[in-house]
Image (tube, grey):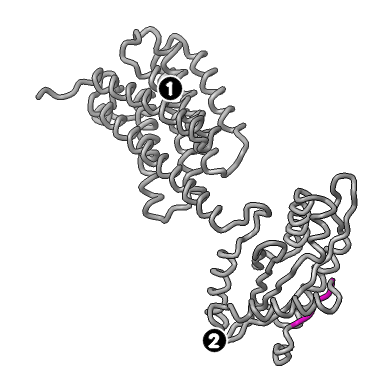
Amino acid sequence: MPPLDADTLLMVIAVFDAVACVVWLLLGEALRIAPRAARLIAAHHGLLALSWWPALPASLEIPVSLPLSVVASGLLTAGIRGLMRVRYTLNDIVAIVVVALVAAALSYPHLAAARVVDNVAGAVLVLMAARDIAIGAGFGLVLTSAVLLPYAVLGGVCLWRAADLLGWLPPAMSLAGMTDNAPLALLRLVVNLTIATGLVALVLQRLIARVRHLTRRDALTGLLNRRALEELLARLQAQVDRGRRHALLVLDVDHFKRINDELGHAGGDAALQHLATVIGDTLRDTDAFGRLGGEEFAVLLPDTDLAGAMLVAERLRRLLQERPLDWDDKTWPLSASFGVAMMRREDLQGRGALARADAAMYAAKARGRNRVLRCPDDAEFA
């Protein structure tokens, strides 16, 4: 079987990029997976398919192929930045692409100079993409290194090619372009395949993170749901068994049925969202705030004693009372009853503390609502 020639490999690269363009459009438009980033990456593959198409005459390399290659590199970097959500500004990417296009235009008709500009710009953009992946991928060190490898190879080859075109390398290290260099074209095909595989892995990681987020979050308020709270409570219980001290608050909105009756279910939902915002904004980063169900919520307070937990609950009670709900041209006062309990050693996954805080909350309801009560058995922790 005869070896593949450069033109055949370039055709394979162009076909691969054309297929990848369609795949990313389907991901973004049909499946709604990171649609903005998917469009940018699809455009990257589409432009690469055009720029590598071997049927293009050599006379179009400077006015067509090289500009398309530079813009495609910029689109890839912008798409990866969107996937990583590292930074939302694209000014640096746009500036590099514009400078490269202007420099390539000024170099006309010197093909070597235009190729230098293309390779340098491509190297800078691909290394920027690698940096964004390193910051935002969320993989372990080994997997992140594997994802970054093709970007490092592509950036290194671009810089090598630019140095060769500038005459900075000895003849023994000269590197012909892909149109005359089948091994280099094969390397580019492998790099394109591995970059595409890495991007799919990043998308899958994002989907998994989204599913995990949805399974741990309350759909209405965005707070932790009961399942997530119970998982955290079990982890904190293991720390309590080793000697640390954690507290738990349970709170329930007062007269919530009246709110639903007066304002409707939409107003009731707004009241719960308002409470989530008011209380969530004042808690520490280490605290965990979630919805147990209905109008009942819980706050986990790590490394907090009983006195501190009582102070936190009283502050939250006052804050909620001072910030009424504005809904449908009405101002509706909100209040909640709070129960406070300490976590104790050998509680089964922290459920005992949850039951004690819940009982204290109901006792606060029975005593007139809008108040804070601690579990009476927690006096030893005061």
Q: Quadrant of the N terminus?
A: top left
The foreground one among 284 and 121 is 284
- Residue 21 placement (x, y as % from top left): 42, 26
Please tell me whether residue 292 is drawn above or below residue 84 in the rendered image: below
Name the residue: 38% across, 20% down.
49
Report if residue 264 lies within the magenta region: no
Residue numbers of the magenta segment: 370-374
Q: Is residue 227 above or below residue 172?
A: below
Residue 7: x, y in percent? 25, 17
> At numbered mark 1, what does the secondary structure look like: helix, strand or loop?
helix
Amino acid under label 1? Gly
338, 13: nearer the viewer: 338
Q: Which residue is mark 2?
A: 346
Report the magenta stretch's main SS: strand
**What is the crowding at mark 2: few (fewer than 14 residues within 10 Å), some, or many (at least 20)?**
few
* Disc nearest the viewer among 1 and 2: 2
Examine the image and state in which quarter residue 296 appears. Answer: bottom right
Q: Secondary structure at mark 2?
A: loop
Taking the image as shown, residue 158 lies to the left or right of residue 138, namely left
Furthest residue toward bottom: 380
